Amino acid sequence: MGMPVMRNKVSLSLLSDDPPSRFLEKSVLPLDAAPIHVKTTGGAPRTSVLRNPNMEKLQKGYLFPEISIKHEAHLKKYPDAKVISLGIGDTTEPIPSVITSAMAEYVLALSTPEGYQGYGPEQGQMNLRKVIAEKVYPAMGIKESEVFISDGAQCDIARLQTLFGPNVTIAVQDPTFPGYVDNGVIVGQTGSADEAGKYAGIAYMRCAPENHFFPDLSRAPRTDVIFFCSPNNPTGHAASAAQLRELVDFARRNGSIIVFDTAYACVAQAGGLACLSTEEGRDAVRRVVGVYKDNARVLVDTFASLGKEVYGGTDSPYVWVRFPGHRSWDVFAEILEKTHVITVPGSGFGPGGEGFIRVSAFNSRDRVLEAAARLKKFLA
Amino acid sequence: MGMPVMRNKVSLSLLSDDPPSRFLEKSVLPLDAAPIHVKTTGGAPRTSVLRNPNMEKLQKGYLFPEISIKHEAHLKKYPDAKVISLGIGDTTEPIPSVITSAMAEYVLALSTPEGYQGYGPEQGQMNLRKVIAEKVYPAMGIKESEVFISDGAQCDIARLQTLFGPNVTIAVQDPTFPGYVDNGVIVGQTGSADEAGKYAGIAYMRCAPENHFFPDLSRAPRTDVIFFCSPNNPTGHAASAAQLRELVDFARRNGSIIVFDTAYACVAQAGGLACLSTEEGRDAVRRVVGVYKDNARVLVDTFASLGKEVYGGTDSPYVWVRFPGHRSWDVFAEILEKTHVITVPGSGFGPGGEGFIRVSAFNSRDRVLEAAARLKKFLA
C-alpha cells in the first residue's frame, strides 16, 4: 500500500460520495522521486472529519450533473440513439480566427525573453480594461481602473457570496440561475429547503408570464442584496430600460446592492482585446452570435406552431416553454425518451420554474433543425 | 449621472476601501446599447450592507499587496533606483517552446469545426490526467480518474476550506504560506488574532532551525486537518521521507486529513501534456528549473559567506535567512533602503517567521548576481 499522504488535489474526491478513508490511501511525490512505501497494520485509515454543514442543505444535486446522469442512462438504454443536446448552455461554433490568432501570438511570445510574463496583473491587463471601458461603457464615465477582468461570472458569484458572508439577506428572481442561491446556502445565508425547494431566508421574486417575467416589487421584501440576471437564465427574458429603472429605484429606497449579471450580454475573454478593438473582431463576434440567434428563432417558431406557450429566444440564447399541469422533470424525461433531445427541467432553476422546460439555442444549425423536426413530430 | 445599476464585475470594488455607495453609481449595458440616463434627486445612494464579519478578523493586509505598496513608495523616493525583486515568487524565464507550440496549436484549432470545444471537461482533459497518473505517480496504482486538473493550488485551498467549513480544526506549519490560515479565517474556523498574529483556534506547529524545520509532533494537538507544505514556503525546507512517514503516522492515529501542498514540486498546466509526455518536454522543464536552482545556490552562498544563518535553497526556490534580534519588517526596510532589493519579511508567514527574511530565486541570472553583489556590500 502506498504511503498515505494525501495528494494535493483533493477537491474532487471530497465532493464525491467516496468514504473519507479514501483520502488517506495515496500519496503525491515530486516528479522523478522514487515511490515510498510504508507498512501499515490493519485496515484502511479512518477519519471522522466532517464537511461544511451548509453543504448538506443543498438540494439533491446541481442541476447539470443530474442531467448528465440521465443522459448517460439514456445512452445505455439506446446505444444507437443520435442524442441532440439542447440542454446545458454550451457553444458549438468555432471561435473567429481573429480572436484565436491573437491568443496564439500571445502564447508563442511567452517563449521569448521579451514576451514572457510571470504572474499577470491580478485585475487584468490594463489595455484590455481600457478597451472595455471605452467600447462597452461609452460616454458613461467609466474609467479603466473600474473594470476588473475575472475568470468568469460563476467564480465571481461564489466570491461575492463569500464576501457578503452569512449575515446578509438576498433576493433572487424565481426562476433563475441556481448559482446565486447555492452559494448563499454554502456561506450560511439560509435555513433548509422546503418541499418546493425554497430555502428559508431567501426572498424569491416570482417571474412568470403573468407578470411579464418582471417581479412585482410592490410585494417584494427589502433585502441587503438583489441578484438580477438579464437576459434571464432560464426564461430568456431581457428586462426593459423601464423595468431596470424600477428595480434601481426599489434598491435605492431600500439601500440594497444589486448584483447585475449580464452573462449573455456579450463577450470578454482571452481574445477580448482583438475582438473589441477592431471592426473585424466585432463583426466576427456578431456573426457567431447571429448563428445562435437564428437557432433560437427556429426553436421559438417550432413550439409556437404547435400551440405551446413559448417565451424568451429574443436577444437571449434560451427558449422557455410551458407545459401546464405537468412536472418539469416528467416533461424532460418524456421528450428525451421520445425524441432523444436533451432539454433542461425548469424546476431546476427554482420553484417558479415548475411546469416549464428550458431549450438552449447553443448547437449547430443542422442539429437544431433536426431537433425541431423531432419535436414537431412528438408534440403534434 | 449614469443609471445606478450595479455593474456585473464588482469583486474589486467590494474589496477596496471605497464607500459602499460607489457600487450604485454606474451601470452595465449590452454591447452596442445606447446609454440610459436616469434623473436622481439628492446625493449619492447609500447602503448599510455589511461584508462577511470574518473578513474583519484578517490581519492588516495580505503580505504581497503590502510589499507592493512599500515597493511603490520606494520608487517615489528613489525614481532612478534599479530595484531588483527577490520578493514574490514570480518566474522570469521564458516558457520552453515545446510547451507554447502545443498551446498555440490547440488555440488555433478552436477556430475549426473539428478543433472547437465548448465547456471543457470539468475535471480536466482525460489524456492529460492519464499522463499525470502514469508519469507523476508511477507504480503507485493511481488511476487517471483520481487525478483532477484545477486552476491552481491557491484556488484549491480556498475551495477546500469552504468544503471543510467553520467547524473544522486545522494545524499549519509556522511559518507557512498564508493562504491556509487566511481562508480558514474567512470561513469562520478561528477567533481573532493576538498581538503576535496567532489566530485563536489554529494549531501553529513551529518549524525552526532548532527542530530542523520539522514540527515536534509529540507536542502538537490533534486537529481535523493538517496543512503541510513541502518544499515549505517560505523556509524552503523539503521534508525527508522519514519525516513524512512520521507525519502520516501522526495523522492516522488522530484520524486527521493531511492536505499536502507540493506547489513547487513541479509543473502541471496548459502545456502540461506536451511537457510530461515527451522526453524533449521533460528536458525543457528541467532546464528552466535548473536556472532557478542555480540562482538559489548563488543566494545561499552569498549569505553563508557573510556568516549568516541561511536555510532552504536546495530543491526549493526560496532561501530563508535569519537576522537574530531584528524584526523582519525592519530588515526588509533596511535592505530595500540600502540595496534597492525587495525581499519578503518572514513574519508575514506566521509568528514563527519573525526574525527571518525570505529571498526568492525567481529572477534572471544577471539580476540575481547583481543583487548578490549589492547584498555582499551591504552586509559586509
Image (tube, coloured by chain):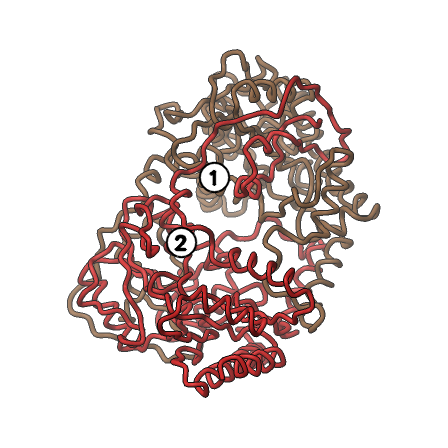
Chain colours: A brown, B red
Q: Are marks 1 and 2 in contact (CB under 8 Å)?
A: no
- Pointer 2: what residue? A11
Q: Quadrant of the N terminus of chain A?
A: bottom left
> For the view shown, which residue lies furthest in the right direction?
A279
Q: Is residue B195 left or right of residue B63?
A: left
Percent across and percent down for residue B14 are 53, 39
Compare residues B29 and A142 and report the one nearer the observer.
A142
Query: Viewer-nearest of labels 1 and 2?
Result: 2
Percent across and percent down for residue B369 are 58, 82
* Residue at (66, 74) in percent of width and height: B97
- Pointer 1: what residue? A67
Percent across and percent down for residue A191 are 34, 29
Query: How busy is the neighbourhood of tag 2: few (under 14 within 10 Å), some, or many (20 plus)?
Result: some
> For the view shown, which residue lies furthest in the bottom direction?
B305
Q: Give the distance between the C-alpha atoms of the residues marked 1 and 2, in whole angstroms.
A: 22 Å
Q: In the rendering, which numbered label is found on residue B161?
A: none
- What's the chain of the residue with tag 2? A
Work out whether residue A59 can be spotted: no
Percent across and percent down for residue B327 are 40, 66
> For the view shown, which residue lies furthest in the left direction?
A42
